[in-house]
Image (cartoon, rainbow, N blue to C red):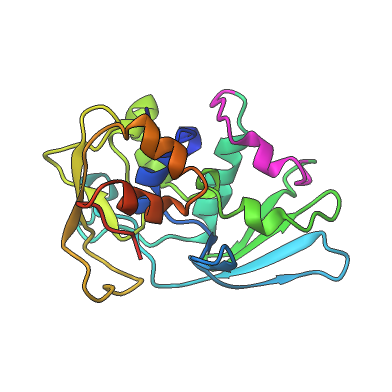
Amino acid sequence: SSLDPAFARELETMWATNQLFDGLVELNDNLEIVPCIAKSWEISPDGLIYRFTLRDSVFFHPSPLFGDSLGRKVTAHDFVWSFNRILNPEVASPGQWIFAHVNQTGNSAFIAENDTTLLITLKSPFQPFLGLLATQYANVVPQEIVTHYGAEFRNHPIGSATRRPTSADRATRNTGGYFEESGRLWRGCPGGETDGLFLRGPLPASARTTQARARPSTALSAASPVLRPRR
């Protein structure tokens, strides 16, 4: 199992990474595409160019590797690096397929015009593309943290979502762990939500089967009463 979104393909780890990482867009409870780190976007008339405007208030979880106890701001450059990492054959992410319609000629696929503007160019129009950006593979990760830990990033995840693993416990499918609220809640603190969440370990087969079609965070909550949705 892995808490690296580039390798989170099992239901349990998909649900866990949903608590730790964010992407440009996400799905709401009605399975509609809604803004996440991208507060808005435009699609060119020919359907080839997607221009995302990012929020300027999203930070990665704090880490000594940032040299700043308050974390580091998420920028469009982080998405460029994260998406290119998914496509890197040396990384061998099972999520490469989500960018199959992206124009990978030269360096035109992903462009950060500035810290808050990201361009993605497709090789042909593909209407479901926004939905693919709501998958865990399209979550943003910090280059300096991933570079430092290498393959061990899966056990030392640093994201930008509401929660982060505590320093004492690493939440994995097999061992369980506690997720605490991160220091900067750019989403705001949802009313009535608890301070954290405990991931017990592997879900029973019955839960995996009956919850397979549910929204990840909702399914996680339904499978165990100690868990809460991210939002």
- Foreground residue, 169 or 148? 169
Position of 110 compared to 72: left or right?
Answer: right
The part of the image, by quadrant, that contains residue 53 is bottom right
In the shown orientation, is residue 108 left or right of residue 76? right
Q: Position of residue 165 (x, y in %)?
A: 22, 45
Q: Nearer the viewer, residue 95 or 184?
A: 95
Q: Which quadrant would the N terminus be assigned to in this image? A: top left
Estimate the x, y position of residue 146 in percent, counting from the top left. 39, 37
The one of 62 and 93 positioned closer to us in this rendering: 93
Question: Would you say residue 142 is visible in this rendering?
Answer: yes
Residue at image x 49%, y 52%? 78
Q: Is residue 36 above or below residue 203?
A: below
Residue at far left of view: 168
Q: Is residue 80 left or right of residue 172?
A: right
Whether residue 159 is visible here, answered yes or no, is no
Give how far across and how far down residue 206 sits, in percent: 38, 34
Compared with 78, 33 (above or below) is below
Q: Position of residue 160 (x, y in %)?
A: 36, 57
Q: State how many labels appear.
A: 0
Q: At x 39% / y 66%, what residue is drawn?
A: 58
Whether 42 is among the magenta residues is: no
| Nearer to us in this view, 177 or 104 | 177
Q: Which residues are magenta?
A: 90-104
User: Is residue 97 covered in magenta?
Assistant: yes
Is 125 placed above or below 92 here?
below
SS assignment for the magenta stretch, majority: loop
Who's the residue at 26% across and 47% down the image? 224
> Which quadrant does the C terminus fall into?
bottom left
